[in-house]
Image: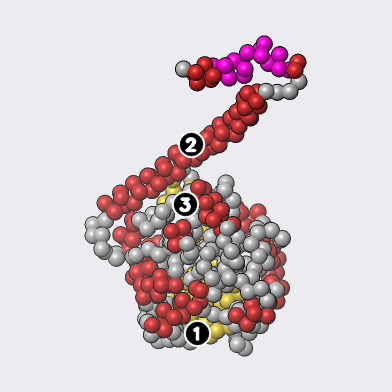
Amino acid sequence: MRKLFQNIRNVRVCENPFWRFRNSIRGTPTSRQKECRNRKMGFPFAKAFLGLAVPYTAYALYISLQSNREITEREGQLQNKKSMDFADTLIKYSQLQILGRFENPFTEYRIQTIYEFFFNRLVEVFERNRGGIPVQQSAMDELMPVHKPTWASGENTECEAKLTYEVLGPEQVPAPQRAEKLPPLHVTWLGQSCSYIVYRGVKILTDPLMSDYLLHEKLGPKRITKMPVQPEEIPAPDVILVSHNHPDHLDEVSMKQWGSGNSAALWIIPKGLGEYVQRHGVERYVELSWWDTCRLKFQGTGEIPLSLDVVCTPAMHWSGRSLFDTNRSLWASFLLRDNGMPVLFHAGDTGYVADLFVRIKERFGAGVKLALLPCGQYCPEWHQKPRHISPSEVLKVMKDMEASNVLGVHWGTFVLSGEYFREPKEKLELLAEFEGVKDKCYCPELGKTTTIH
């Protein structure tokens, strides 16, 4: 009872004009007044937080439930759940949109909320020597040697042919054909998922990243390894493949360098990304949805036109450069084909899906000449697994696609996760040795041009 009267008196102190007037004359606020003032000051912040958290939580829950519902409905439409028929593949793994944003149609995926995102960022603050970066630059140079690229080992990279293209729907792509032997492919890893490929004289750049910082010229995570070359030293690419719009897969420097003018490339990008790249000066681009194909035709003087297909294939990831454009554009992987045969698979960023890569193989052919697969940014596993594959999963993808060669990328460039920065390379190459494919599956050195025969 005494406590009840005490609470009533506290309320009177806060609300009664007489008490407020008396205390104002005395000059010094009472402890009860201070307590009341603190309560009033804290209440708007709590109200604002709840005003944002409650609707966002409801939105995230709705997206999760709707995604699961759509996945279940698609599963129900399949005549045979184990069938690898392309018609079933289109039902199961066509792109998914909910409330105007793209979502993942995979049972393996778990939606990442802002709560999880910021909790993981908070945990990172307390990690000591995150990534295990050596203090001395000389030690870093020894661990991560940087080479001067040779690009194509003497092959002519000056393509004078006129490039035209057309977009084909999922059903218009020819079935895989047998070829005696595909010509060699030259690949140079420039960091993260950025690689420079020369095939039949055609120059292809994947997920262009030329910046030292991720967010701005001097803001964001900084590169831990040097760029092998400056953008102006790179032979202008004919085609640029962008898997998604995350800052470590697409930067403004690249769009400025190869977006317009004499060095302008054809940018092949996922659906919804066109407005962004156009705003940053890219004049020539084509947007693709999952399973669409961009047929490239190179017409030279007096020569038979060279025709290559770039197929936009699914990936399990997400997109966004800020909190406000999350999943506004699609994410994807790409498969380059020559005369119906798979030449290059660029995975970009993806988690592992049990039957996705098998379905890609069944549709477009086994034995892709080279697969560029991400092998880093997988720690902590509880947070990263739905969006990034680990070294052990790289070998699973290699088996699923029956890839002839694999290069592990997306590591050793920035510290974006908890593992030791060289762990992806060391673990992948150790596992590849156990599997007996150490000469076919490994991590490249920065700037070193490798020829795949």
Along the line of sight, which residue is nearer the eye, 103 or 417?
417
Q: Earlier along the polypeptide chain: callout 2 or callout 1?
A: 2
User: Do residues under tags 1 and 3 come within 8 Å of each other at their CB atoms?
Assistant: no
Which residue position holds label 2? 54
Residue 126 drawn at (x, y percent): 58, 58
In the picture provided, is 216 more to the left or to the right than 405?
right
In the picture provided, is 322 more to the left or to the right than 87?
right
What's the residue at 29%, 54% (across, down)?
75
**Magenta extent:** 8-24
Amino acid beneath label 3: Gln
Asked whether residue 240 appears in the rendered view, the answer is no
Report, in whole angstroms, how far the alpha carbon at label 1 lies from the one at label 3.
38 Å
Q: Quadrant of residue 208?
A: bottom right
- Point out which mark residue 452 bears: 1
In the picture provided, is 419 more to the left or to the right than 341?
right
What's the residue at 41%, 53% (across, down)?
110
What's the residue at 64%, 80% (across, down)?
139
Amino acid beneath label 2: Val
Residue 241 drawn at (x, y percent): 55, 67
Q: Badge 1, how many Cα within 10 Å: few under 14, some, many 20+?
A: some
As drawn, the residue found furthest toward the front would be: 2
- Point out which mark residue 112 bears: 3
Residue 12 is covered by the magenta coloring: yes
Asked whether residue 150 appears in the rendered view, the answer is yes
Q: Earlier along the polypeptide chain: callout 1 or callout 3?
A: 3
Main SS, magenta region, reads helix
Along the line of sight, which residue is nearer the eye, 88 or 304?
88
Report, in whole angstroms, how far the alpha carbon at label 3 lies from the one at label 2.
16 Å
Q: Earlier along the polypeptide chain: callout 3 or callout 2?
A: 2
Along the line of sight, which residue is nearer the eye, 86 or 426?
426
Q: Quadrant of residue 172?
A: bottom left
